Image: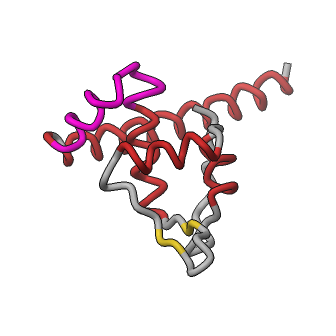
Amino acid sequence: MAENTEKPTKIYYSIKEVAEMMNVSESLLRYWESEFPHLRPKTTGNRVRQYTQKDINQIKIIYNLVKVRGFKLAAARKMIQANRAGANKSQEVIDSLISVRDQLKELKKQLDGLV
């Protein structure tokens, strides 16, 4: 999953920004909203979605279960409902591993520059 790992600087993100962060389409995010009841971003009067960091974390969990681990939507929904804390912890571990990988890549670039 190629995601932007910068620190959050905003309270609300647009659907376009979230789609770019997660490298998925906007329509997939809207579809996941219909399939996962706990994923409900705030909407304005003009029906513009505003995602918080909590919503983005939920999307990361769904992405991991569906796109990375290959779960069907119904199975992912059941897993999230049955094991809420475990799913969150799993996402934290994945985020940590991605960060370590990025640091190792940067270190390798620096070492390659010395040779």
Q: Quadrant of residue 14?
A: bottom right
Give the camera-side residue of 82 and 97. Answer: 82
Q: Residue at x 46, y 41 (%)?
A: 95
Q: Main secondary structure of the magenta part?
A: helix
Q: Quadrant of residue 65?
A: top left
Q: Quadrant of residue 91?
A: top left
Q: Residue at x 59, y 62 (%)?
A: 7
Q: Residue at x 45, y 43 (%)?
A: 32
Q: Position of residue 36 (x, y in %)?
A: 34, 46
Q: Is residue 104 magenta?
A: no
Location of residue 49 with respect to 87 vertically, above or below: below
Location of residue 59 with respect to 17 vertically, above or below: above
- Does residue 79 appear left or right of residue 15 in this picture? left
Q: Position of residue 108 (x, y in %)?
A: 71, 25
Q: Is residue 79 magenta?
A: yes
State the extent of the magenta-drawn residues as a range: 65-81
Q: Residue at x 39, y 51 (%)?
A: 58
